[in-house]
Image: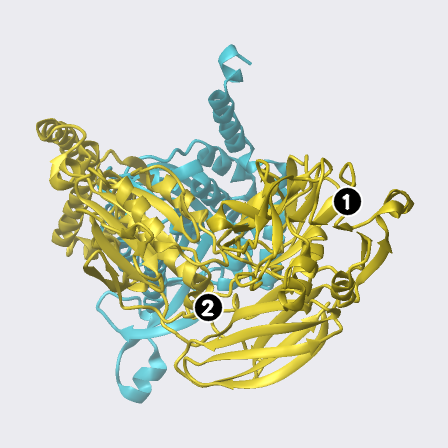
Chain colours: A cyan, B yellow
Amino acid sequence: MGLLDVLPWRRDKKAVSAADDDLFDDKFQRKLEYLALVSRRVFAGRLRAERRTKKSGSGVEFADHRDYQPGDDFRYLDWNVYQRFEKLLVRLYEEEEDLAIYFILDTSASMAFGDARKLRYAKKVCAALAYVGLANLDRVTMVTTSDRVMERMPETRGKARIFKAFRFLREVKAEGTTDLGDAMKTFVAQNKRRGLAVLVSDLYDPRGFEKGINVLRYNKFDPFVVHITDPGEGKPKLNGDVLVYDCETGDEREVTVTAKVLSLFGEAYAAYLADIDRFCATHQVPYVTASVDVAFDELILRVFRRGGFLR
Amino acid sequence: MIFAGLPFAQLLAVFGAVGFGVLVLYILKLRRRVVAVPFSPLWERILRDKEATSLFSKLKRLLSLLLQLALLAALVLALGDPRRAESLIKGRTFVVLVDASASMQATDESPSRLAVAKDGVQTLIQGLGGSDRMLIAQMDAMVTPLGPLTGDASTLKDELKGVHATDSRADFPRALRFASDVLRGVDRGEIIVVSDGELGDASDASGPVHLGSAKLSYLEVGHSDRNVGVTQFSVRRYPLDKSRYEVMLELTNTGSTVEDVELQLLGDDALVDITKLRLQPHERLPRFYPQLSGASRTLEAKIARVDGTHDDLAADDHAYALLPERRRAKVLVVSAGNTYLEAALLLDEYLDVTDVAPAGYPDALKKGTWDAVVFDGATPPEMPKAHALYLDPRGPGSPVKVTDELKQPGFDKVERKHPVVRFLALDDVNVALGHKLVPETGDKVLGASDGGASPLLVAGTRGGYRFVAAGFDVRDSDLPLRTAWPLFIINCINWFTDEDTQYLSSFRTGEVWRIPVAAGVTAATVKLPDGTVQPVPVHEGRAVMLGEHAGFYELTAGDQRTEFAANLLDVSESTIAARDALPVDGRSAEGQSVARVSTPMIGLPNEPAWMWLLFLVAALTALEWATYHRRMTV
């Protein structure tokens, strides 16, 4: 310990750093094992890597018919239908393949606001869900985003690769502004293989949280939104004349904070959360609110119950 | 308006400099605390509505500036100590005469007239101008200034607290003379009489009071006139039967309504008589109670309304009297034989008379103590150690020198005020032969012949004992044949034994009482009716005090204890109807209700304006604080 380390702010910094190092400690890993077991119990009977995709292909389970197009394999013509309706239709089957799961971790500066509780929490959530995915032999990819795609952990599978995910997550730092729309455009361009896109973010996007989700939807990804929230942000401890500035954009605003203003802010914050919830419900996007005050394992179980992450 | 503090130019400079500072501070943007937020668009949402009222916000901020400038202006004005010009240039002088007589105890005003009067004076004090001065005096039987002329309101208010009611009448002329003396040579002097107005004429033995240039104002207190009071009360024992006594009292209804009252007479605190009486408006009802018995010392008359309530003035509902002490006097008569004398002494059954011949006098004197010795034609060589009556004294043992023989003298001059000869008809007494007596210094000539040149009857004191000497043998006159003879003898005995037929059963409040004390006593104390004991000075053998309260008193002077009673007994004080005007010195001061007196009556508020300005500053500060913290002016 150096001389400067005895100074209080130095001690605090070290303490925060130590907290990051201990993010995925043994206790955390034991919880992951438990969650993986729970996930198997909940989804017992399913085969590994048998997640059905929307991609029709060479599977055995009938999915649909479509008109014959020249060049189609005659073997898939449904002759029974032709006999009855004199119409050439090709039989389509659901192709079975191992699932690609993308964890899109928002690492904009707002995720590290305050004491970075949201970012730490988001990392834990990503790690836990990734472990469950890896345990199910799914292909797990992690990317971090702000106003673009920042870092990427290449596709990997197998439970043993979880430590790779831990290392990746440990190195993640929150910085930059949020632009989920642009970032998702980059993401879909980089990842041709469609799959489950778990967006872990506080959704503080000045251009609108919808854009990023819609980009995923339009590009046939299955978005799954884990909204990281800090209840303290809805009830800021402010009073009097203050100059508030956005920690990402630096936009300033003079505010005289009164009880009435705080009440209005609380209402605006609640309305914002309600907007997100409403949007996701309307577009059938699985959505889970992850409050940093809730234990992460409890959240993971909630994700399981919510459905959409594992089928 | 002038400034008694900083001059106006300096005030302007101060206001300009500090005001500029305030303006600069106001213009300088308030440095706000910088706070990071995770997502500013949320704040944008709530501030969008506020921006719509930004003009109003600016106006509110302007209000804040105006408040601060107003606060500054008030402070700067306070530094200037602004006053009305005339209040500084010409001060006025007020003498406030607060009536503290018995009628001011009336309770028609709550809690009493005096309390209301004091409240009114308090208002007057608050209305004093910066250069005004005031003197407050209590007006009752005396005039008591409660402090010097001063303009200090707090001092005047403290003095005012010292005003207390007494059971005496107000000596209005004396008070006016005092006030006019205070205001003599003073410009803009004003006498303010705070009273119910029943003060009598503004004239005394010296004539009407002249106020000079002083203005007279009258603050009227009281509105009711309902009162029944005891206005006369006297009691005396019968001279020849001292176990019995008679009482004379008078009740007066000073109000304008018929009153039914119950009169109780208490002797030694026991009920002696009770009577229900109806008094017509303004009726004076005398009552005479002869041949009463049962009381040995104290007598009290008490009235109350039949319905059990009290009238508006309780001070005159009681009257007190003390009966003269009753005891048997031992009298030694030294005479060769005088039937007239013996007969006269027989009339008083409370006399224990012993007759001796002149030769047996020395032995008789040794045998006992005597309250009085009567020498009839015999004069011992030296005076006895007892009071003595000398009839036709001769020789060196006479208390007065006996000189020329007087033929057929008469009582040309009689000292009618002396208790020995009071009410005696001596003018036409015929004396065949007498002798001229030569009184010594301090002796009193009670009767004299030759136009007063030849004293025949002398009274005085020798060696602490009283004597009366008659310069003739009563048998050489027709005095024994007259009614005056036995009365003269009994008067002498009574005077010797202090049993004066004119014994005062009570003193009157508001007068200076002179109570005799034993010779050689220099200090005395008196116990007042309320139980407090206070010292009283002794002057020329008498304890001197001003009686202010009705009731029973007890004077202690050396070993001697003297009880006496005091009463108000004053119709004018019992008349509690407030008078509308106060005629003095040819003018008439119209009454103004003291309840409606206000500070503008006499001028500006006494508190300097800077005090009010500081109050304003405090109020503005509070307003600024409240509006700021409620975010009304930010």
Mark 2 near mark 1, Cβ–Cβ under 8 Å? no
The residue marked by circle 2 belongs to what chain?
A: B
Q: Under tag 1, what secondary structure? A: loop
Residue B183, position as x, y percentages in the image: 24, 41
Q: Quadrant of residue B19?
A: top left
Q: Which residue: 51% across, 76% down? A: B251
Q: Under tag 2, what secondary structure? A: loop
Q: Which mark is residue B107?
A: 2
Residue B445, position as x, y percentages in the image: 56, 47
Asked if badge 2 and badge 1 are on a common chain, one would say: yes
Q: Which residue: 78% across, 37% down? A: B381
Residue on which the image places disc 1: B386
Residue B151, position as x, y percentages in the image: 29, 38
Q: Amino acid at mark 1?
A: Ala
Q: CA distance from mark 2 to mark 1?
A: 54 Å
Residue A248, position as x, y percentages in the image: 28, 39
The residue marked by circle 1 belongs to what chain?
A: B
Q: Quadrant of residue B218?
A: bottom left
In this rendering, is residue B95 above or below B185? below
Q: Amino acid at mark 2?
A: Thr
Q: Quadrant of residue A94?
A: bottom left
Q: How many marks?
A: 2
Dot 1: few (<14), some (14–19), or many (≥20) neighbours within 10 Å?
many
Q: Is residue B333 left or right of residue B220?
A: right
Observer-nearest of A247 and A210: A247
